[in-house]
Amino acid sequence: MGFVEASWLVTRKDLLIEFRSREIVYTTLFFAVSCLLVFAFGFVREGRAVEDAAAGILWVAIAFSGTLALGRAFERERQNETLRGLLMAPIARPALYVGKLTGIVLLLVAVELVMVPMAGVMFQARMLAHPVLLSALVLTGTIGFTAVGTLFAAMLVRTRSRDVLLPVLLYPVTVPVIIAGVRGTAALLAEEPNVAMARLWLSMLVTFDVFFITLALWTFEAVMTE
Amino acid sequence: MLDFTSLAFTDVSRNFGRRRALNRVTLRCDAGEIVALLGPNGAGKSTLLSIAATLLEPSSGTLRYGDHDRHRDLRARIGLLAHDLYLYPELTAAENLTFFAQLHGVADAASRVDRALASARLADRRDDPVSGFSRGMRQRLALERALLHDPRLVLLDEPFTGLDDASAAGLVERLRELRGRGAIVVLATHDLEVIEGLIDRAVMLRDGRLVAIADGPAPLRQRFRSACDSEIRQAGH
């Protein structure tokens, strides 16, 4: 079986399970909306938001809800040891990584479709001024964050304190992604949008994505070997 | 597709931290043979099966599948029924089998899944989520999942768990059929009466070491107890 076909099978299976349970989407969305709401009370005064608050808070919400989704996606594979069932398949193990990564990214994108407009309304940010560039920033940032998170979540799936260890390991490594996402988004949402600056941060995000995915593909087989 | 007609462990050890789960195990199993792996809980039976299934690496020693070393493509010829059943409770019986059949590259997965569901006596529950199944039904489904891709090496960890008498008898027949088709069957179990007359050979694991169980006309349980007693006496000396 080919790499892409095997990855797609895993992604499709994850999406089907999520379609049945709606567990990750609902919990992640609820968490992200709560996060935005709490920060809106803190950073919006007399109808005006603190400068760059929307960008920062949007990425905090993406990071926190992404961590929640990553943990839950692998908890499912641990509960019935189905991860071992996947590892028994005669396919390249990095295909499992790509399959899980794609599934989690698609779920997070679904949540972001609600989260981003909501952040725009709460912080009076002009999210629709540069929709393509903003979408590209959010998507590449989500891929970079999830690329590292999927590898770490797979590594930690058999450890007892995985819920604590995942954010502890994940956040320091993904700081460059979060910073690039925040600065790129802030450049777009400013009073006078700086498109050139946003493009620069976007190119950095693409570089991070390529680097992190390559590293994960290279190490996943070893990480999954007991 | 890679194939093999024997499985050979040579001096295989496996450590988990400072604990040695397997201690220099040497064992050979051939096609058309059913080998029972007996022993108390924690003796290393599941570890041995996991190593044979390529899920665990041995700490030392070698493992050969016929003329081949451990290789990704060999997994297409290995089926494992472990204590955890590797089934997704949110998916239906048919969806679970179809997913694993496709992942193993089974040709004509749909008709193979239909036959597997019929074998598991779950054809009428094919579209029900596995979360609603009893342990015995899950066990039967998981057995079919392990056999979907017609494996040469069949590894079974406590396969009779949760099965009623009729299902256990069905499983015994299924194992005979697999042996007749030239499969290598290795099963770890405590159900000695059920496998009496089925297995070709029994070995015992005790504290990670392999101990032979003598052949003979005596019932398996009696021979197993003799081997245990002999081990305990040796440990005392």
Image (cartoon, coloured by chain):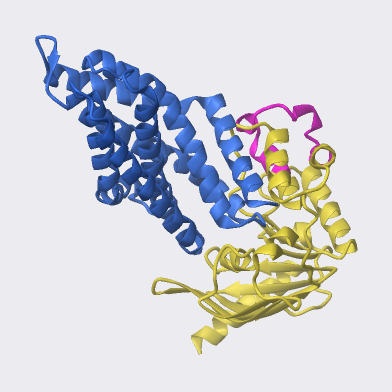
Q: Quadrant location of residue B92? A: top right
Chain B drawing hue: yellow
Residue visible at 48% across and 32% down in the picture: A106
Indicate whether A121 appears above or below B171: above
Question: Is residue A79 at least partly visible in the picture?
Answer: no
Indicate whether A196 appears above or below A176: above
Residue B166 placed where, x, y %? 81, 43
Chain part drawn in magenta: B116-141
Residue visible at 57% across and 51% down in the picture: A95
Is A153 in front, or is B42?
A: A153
Indicate whether A211 appears above or below B204: above
Residue B13 placed where, x, y %? 54, 78
Residue B199 placed where, x, y %? 80, 66
Of all chains in the rendering, the one displayed in blue is A
Is B143 in front, or is A134?
A: A134
Using residue B184 as the reference point, say whether residue A165 is left or right of it.
left
Is B220 in front, or is A200?
A: A200
Q: Is residue A83 magenta?
A: no
Q: Is residue B135 magenta?
A: yes
Residue A179 placed where, x, y %? 23, 41
Question: Is residue B143 at least partly visible in the picture?
Answer: yes
Residue visible at 83% across and 37% down in the picture: B114
Using residue B146 as the reference point, say whether residue A12 is left or right of it.
left
**Residue at the extreme top:** A46
Main secondary structure along the magenta-highlighted residues: helix
